[in-house]
Image (cartoon, rainbow, N blue to C red):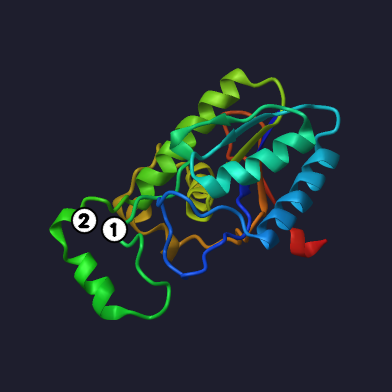
Amino acid sequence: MIRVHFVRHGAVHNPDAVVYGRLPGFPLSIEGQAQARATASHLRRLLATSPPFVLASPLTRAQDTAAIVADALDVPVRTDERLVEADSPFDGLPRRFAPIQYLARYFDRERTHQHEAPGDVALRMMQVTRELLLQANSDVVMVSHQFPIQMARFGFERRIDERPAYLVKRFPFVLFRVRCTLASVTTLTFLGSERPPKAHYWEPAQQ
């Protein structure tokens, strides 16, 4: 039995209120640092007898969160590009309602190639998870982003690599909605290859 703990990064310093996606920069805010410390304390209690692997997305907010978690667990952080946020053509646009800007970006041929299908996000997250399951003798902590974490859970629970239905891989949000708030921990417990993992969810606000 191995548990994989998917940690979403904490709140981000974003004074201009833009869609930051894969843009460089965007560290944790003061609130986000506090959230990450709460998550680190939770994981330290949970993993007191089994020091884990800690992997993180290369983006600043994930690296900041992973550093706080790894410091609490007294383990190093490894970076894996596959844990990065989903690719999107809308990075840099305002988060407020701005339909003209979003439509213009949507029909910009140079940017439409940036759209990453949900199924592809799930498959890359599943790939890195499976690799770690072969390497790890203890729990694994992976610091990533909301949509990739949701898609990892969806992918394993629905076994999308074994049942690659187009609609399920392209529009999973029609069938699958789960919480993944800032600094939350989504734990998948793998009991063997014959059945889907068991899921458990924790978030700082619950404490």
Q: Is residue 148 visible?
A: yes
Q: Is residue 107 above or below residue 124?
A: below
Kind of residue at disc 1: Pro
- What percent of the width, then of the height, locates residue 55? 59, 33
Q: Residue at x 64, y 46 (%)?
A: 65
- Number of labels in the image equals 2
Q: Is residue 202 visible?
A: no
Task: Name the residue at 59% across, 18% down.
Answer: 135
How far from the left and from the top, in percent, is residue 164? Answer: 34, 43
* Residue holding disc 1: 89
Query: Is disc 2 surrounded by few (<14), some (14 to 19) or many (20+) residues within 10 Å?
Result: few
Q: Nearer the viewer, residue 29 or 11?
A: 29
**Mark 2 / mark 1, whichever is N-terminal:** 1
* Residue 49 or residue 71, whichever sits in front: 71
Distance of label 2 from label 1 (alpha carbons): 5 Å
- Residue identified by numbered label 2: 111
In this rendering, position of residue 46 left or right of residue 61: right
Q: Which quadrant: the N terminus?
A: top right
State which quadrant residue 77 falls in.
top right
Q: Is residue 161 above or below residue 28?
A: above
Q: Secondary structure at mark 2?
A: helix
Residue at 59 percent across and 25 percent down: it is 133
Tag of residue 25: none
Q: Percent from the top left, x then y, of residue 63?
A: 58, 41
Label 2 with label 1: CB-CB less than 8 Å: yes
